[in-house]
Structures are given as structure tokens and as C-alpha cells.
Image (cartoon, rainbow, N blue to C red):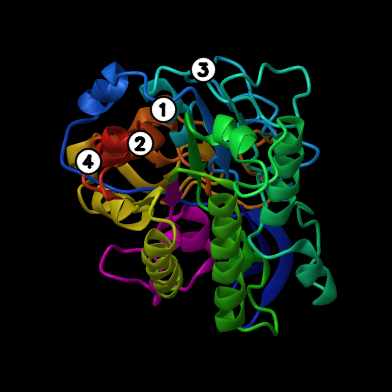
Amino acid sequence: MRCEAMAISSRVVIPLKITLIILTTTLIFSPSSVLSYASTPKKFKKIYAFGDSYTDTGNTHSSTGPSSFNYVSSPPYGNTFFHHPTNRYSDGRLVIDFVAESLSLPLLPPYKDSKADKTYGVNFAVAGSTAIRHRFFVRNNLTLNVTPQSLQTQLVWFNRFLESQGCENSATTPRQCGAVFSDALVWVGQIGANDYAYSFASTISPNTIQRLATRSVTGFLEVLLNKGAKYVVVQGLPPTGCLTLSMYLAPETDRDGMGCVGSVNKQSYLHNTIIQAKLDSFRKQFPQAVIVYADHWNAYSTIVRGANKYGFKEVFKSCCGSGGGNLNFDVFNTCGSPNARSCPDPSQYINWDGVHLTEAMYKTMAGMFLNGTFCKPPFSYLLAKKQ
């Protein structure tokens, strides 16, 4: 995700386009045990994924993604696992990649790759996308280099895909929609962090963004459930105040017990609380569906508080960046730029480029979601309910 404005002090604001994105949750196990879920029996035949850059596997690239992170198509992105860039905002795999591997499925191709084999699912997530429709930001003059895609765009893409399968909704085309959803896991990755970032230091109040963003996310989920989605995982926002970018922008007086930016973390936490309350309502409204909440905020926080236990030596410092110091981050020389350098061992870092996370962090969080106590109800419950 991206941030549209950068505050150098509490009074000086510089318009800027920065990506701000987040995710994940926890349990106490060693990083080496994270892949123990690889032996999970093959319960699903496909995955449909949505979200922002924390989930995007290639719908954006250097020239279309967040402008302050516009080197995603160049090394060192992708170096750890793929050994070349794949337009993922990390050094390797994302949570959704580990989810696919855990279900013995191929990694999800991006929707915009027209040549990809979409037999086993599609990834509709877009880096920099918002929950609120793009026209809201246009109307309020908050469109400086903002990715035009929103969650609504992803729904339009998904509807086109469903139409190609003959599925309109569960009421009018039950057989066709049943074929689409009966063996499919729907993974809604984090979405909404960009909305708060784009409106930062604007005349739009955070409460307005919160109301509109949560309404958009829950409305999107209701559409999916009405179409016949049966197995749905909804990933909340992480503690975005723990990202390197947030630490870089905020005054040092704004810190919470984790050492992160307290005001920003509170914002993400309240957002998640609203989403969770609506999921409880959906469970009653759609009893035939299994709806799981992936508690990204608490998983990420658990790792921050016990970083050494999970194998991380650097909690806030970005692995790939410039400037050195405690954060190794310069918004004008981000990862992939000529002045930026990558650390020798990304697995010791939580943060990859100042906003996005390392493969090691995504892997640890995936393990917490799939094997741990950070899904509500547990992911094992969803697997058990799969018929």
C-alpha cells in the first residue's frame, strides 16, 4: 500500500506517494516448524485471493505500482526464493503463497496475466489498491499518483471471471456457482491500509475513512457470500504503526508499548474491531458458509514482542533500503533504487523495504494463521468443515 503524504514534523507535510501495507498473527513455535502444514490433505481445488500489495502476486509492476516503491520488477525483489523479480513486494513468497503450498496447490497467478493457467485459482489483489472506490479520492483531490484500482475493481474482475464460468449468483445459477465455489477457498487479504495512508494530513477525518473503508470491505464480503462463497478467510490489518515507514514519519513522542507508532496502531485496531463484528453478523446470515478471521494485528504484534523467539534480530529496520541508522530507510531512495542496498540475510528482518515484509515474516505469519491460534475459528476448523 502507499502513503500519499509525508510529515517531516507535526506541521510540515510534503505530498508524496508511499506504499503502506500490512498483515498477520501469532502462536509460539519456531520458524523451522512453520512448514509443518505442508502435509495438509488436499481439501481445496482452487483459491481466489483479493487484497493489496501484501497479497498481490503480479497484477502490478514497476511502472504501475506505488510510485515510491517503483522497482518491484527489478532485483533484489524476489531474490530469496524465486531468484528473480516476480512483481511481489518482498524478497520472496507472500502469505498467500504459503497458503497455496499448504493446500498442495500451485502458486496463484495474477488475474492480469492472460496467459496464465487459472485452473487452480486466480489472484485479484492489486498493490496500492484501496477499499473505498477510487472516485472518492478523485473527488477529494487525493489522487496524486494513486493506484486507480480499488476493491470494487477487483470485484469487477471477479465478476468477469464468474461470468466466464456461467455464475451470476447462488439464486439464479446455483449449479454453475456451486461448481465455482464448492471446492474453492476465498482468501481476502488485508485491504484498507492505503485508504488511511492516502487521506493522511488531508481534510478528510480518519473517522470518515474508517466508516467508508469498513463499509466497503463488508459490502464486498456480502456480495461474495451471496454469490455462493462457502469457505472464506478474511485477513485484518496489521499494526501498521510498526512499519518502518510509520516509524520514519511519526514523531518519537508517538509510541506505544511495542515501540511502534501508537496513533496509527490504534487506527488499525479499531478498523479490525468493526470488521470482526460484521463477520459475526455474517455467520448468522450465511450459516452455510465457514467464515474465518485471520488476526493479522495480534499475530504481527506477537512477533514484534518476541522477535528473538521467532528468529528476527531487526524489528523496525528495513533490510533493503538506504540511509543506514536504526531504520535504513529513505523515502527518496527506496529498495531497488541505485542508492539502495539489500542486507545479507533477510531472514533476520521483519521488514523488507520499509513497508512490505520479508519472506521470513510472511512465512512465520502464515504458520500462525494455518497452524496456530490466530485464526478465529482456527483454520483447522475450516478444513474439517470442508465437505
**Residue 118, position in %: x, y?**
65, 21
- Report if the CB atoms under discs 2 and 3 are less than 8 Å apart: no
Please provide the residue range marked out in magenta. Answer: 233-262
> To which residue does mark 4 refer?
372
Whichever of callouts 2 and 3 sits on the residue coming sooner in the sequence is 3
Whichever of callouts 2 and 1 sits on the residue coming sooner in the sequence is 1
Q: Secondary structure at mark 1?
A: helix
Q: Is residue 349 left or right of residue 125?
A: left
Q: Residue 106 — which label? A: 3
Residue type at tag 1 = Phe
Q: Secondary structure at mark 2?
A: helix
Alpha-carbon neighbours of circle 1 within 10 Å: few (<14), some, or many (≥20)? many
Q: Secondary structure at mark 4?
A: loop
In this view, the residue in front, 32 or 329, is 32
> To which residue does mark 2 refer?
366
Alpha-carbon neighbours of circle 3 within 10 Å: few (<14), some, or many (≥20)? some
Residue drawn 61% across and 19% down?
Answer: 119
Quadrant for residue 175, please give it. top right
For the residues labelled 1 and 3, the Cα–Cα distance comes to 10 Å
